[in-house]
Amino acid sequence: MSALLPLEEALARLLAQAAAEPIVATECIPAADAEGRVLAAPLVADLDLPPWPNSAMDGYALRLADWTGQPLPVSQQVFAGQAPVPLQSGSCARIFTGAPLPEGADSVEMQENVEVQADGRVRFREALHPGQNVRPQGQEIRRGEVLLDAGTRLGPVELGLVASLGVATLAVRRRPRVALLSTGDELVEPGQPLGPGQIYNSNRALLAAWLTRLGCAVLDAGILPDDLLRTRARLAELGEADLILSTGGVSVGEADFLGQVLREEGELTLWKLALKPGKPLTCGRYRGTPLIGLPGNPAATLVTCALLVRPYLLRRLGVTRLEPLRFAVPAAFAWPKAGVRREFLRGRLEQGRAVLHPNQSSGVLRSAAWADGLVEVREGCTLAPGDAVNFIPLAELF
Ligand code: AMP
Ligand code: MG
């Protein structure tokens, strides 16, 4: 039996392959459609944000030099969206949040802190400091600076920033075309009647939704029976894909058709990881097309997609930040027996401690629906309750 490949090494090899085959083509799309896509060029600010100094409060704007402790008359009102006139000296301006500061004013007192007299003049009770409650011009960004780097994945926050610059069209990397193949004689698509010995294909739905979130165009390559000739024929049809992603048919117990076809007509670059679940992961190329074969057990599909397929695809898109957030938390469980494979268990944080789902079978997907994250137990490691384990929130992996 060949030695198991450590996870870090497998990931490093996959990322090197991805970097050597970037998806560089770009397309210009409406920013409103760009969620989950990857910026192809840096987003450079062509204005200051905010474009002018403005008030952070509802209150009164004044020039500090005019403040003597005596009440000041109100010479203008400035609402958000209005253009003020320069501040008359010896006066203050009524001002509202987001309204431009009149020229000459240098600070704002919040309305709760002033006393408006019967004659309308305003007494400022306390000494103010320059710039108080003023958002300076360019506080967020200056014209000419890079707001988002090329290779940034666009989520809600990034799209908010894009809009704040008034940008409505973005250059993004084209979507990777991923051919999704489900292997197994036992599989039936939802909506069809279930025969004896059959189960529904759940991996396809899991991966199709996930890949869409990762900005991929999913080509459903259907269900492939466990048959060498048909495996070969189907793979040959998928040469247009940027990646063939399959599930099942990689364990040695049953017929390992995928591995066999890769060995014969392509290249097997990775096989058998020191990972649980996920050991039989198989990677390579079929007639030049990259292929990743995930194990069929749904929890193994989940773990291997999270740890390997996701970073692989994002790296091909030029994404710079690939590492999911992971943090150490105390384990609420004991792990008396050290394993030879790195385990990723489905768990939750309860009172800051990692709690495991009672059923860690790789065939059970429900544990992952219950879980908030993956709990990492390193190979060769035993744990007592309270020992630190890494926790990776599932939300980081989509
Ligand atoms: P395999 O990797 O083909 O040996 O499959 C391992 C286990 O995962 C078997 O119990 C399969 O029935 C199951 N399985 C394989 N593919 C799928 C799928 N697409 N959806 C649900 N279960 C699957
Ligand atoms: Mg199978």
Image (tube, grey):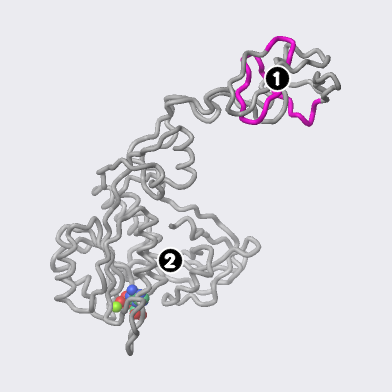
Whether residue 152 is situated above or below residue 324 in the rendered picture: above
Region rendered in magenta? 88-114
Circle 2/circle 1 CB separation < 8 Å: no
Q: Secondary structure at mark 2?
A: strand
Does 101 lie within the magenta span?
Answer: yes
Pointer 2 local density, CA inside 10 Å: few below 14, some 14–19, many at least 20: many
Whether residue 85 is situated above or below residue 347 in the rendered picture: above
* Left or right: 30, with 374 as reference point: left
Q: Quadrant of residue 145?
A: top left
Name the one closer to the observer, 314 or 107.
Answer: 107
The CB of the residue at mark 1 lies under 8 Å from ligand 1: no
Q: Quadrant of residue 9?
A: bottom left
The CB of the residue at mark 2 lies under 8 Å from ligand 1: no
As drawn, the label of residue 342 is: 2
Which residue is painted at 81% across and 20% down in the image? Answer: 120
Q: Residue furthest front?
A: 119
Q: Which residue is mark 1?
A: 93
Q: Earlier in the sequence, mark 2 or mark 1?
A: 1
Whether residue 74 is situated above or below residue 396 in the rendered picture: above
Quadrant containing ligand 2? bottom left
Does 158 lie within the magenta span?
Answer: no
Q: Residue furthest right?
A: 118
In three-dimensional space, the C-alpha distance between marks 2 and 1, rounded to whole angstroms, equals 65 Å
Q: Quadrant of residue 266?
A: bottom left
Q: Position of residue 315 (x, y in %)?
A: 33, 49
Which residue is painted at 51% across and 63% down in the image? Answer: 373
Q: Position of residue 346 (x, y in %)?
A: 50, 68
* Left or right: 331, with 228 as reference point: right
Q: Secondary structure at mark 1?
A: strand
**Residue 154 can be seen, yes or no:** yes
Q: The N terminus appears in which quarter of the rendering?
A: bottom left
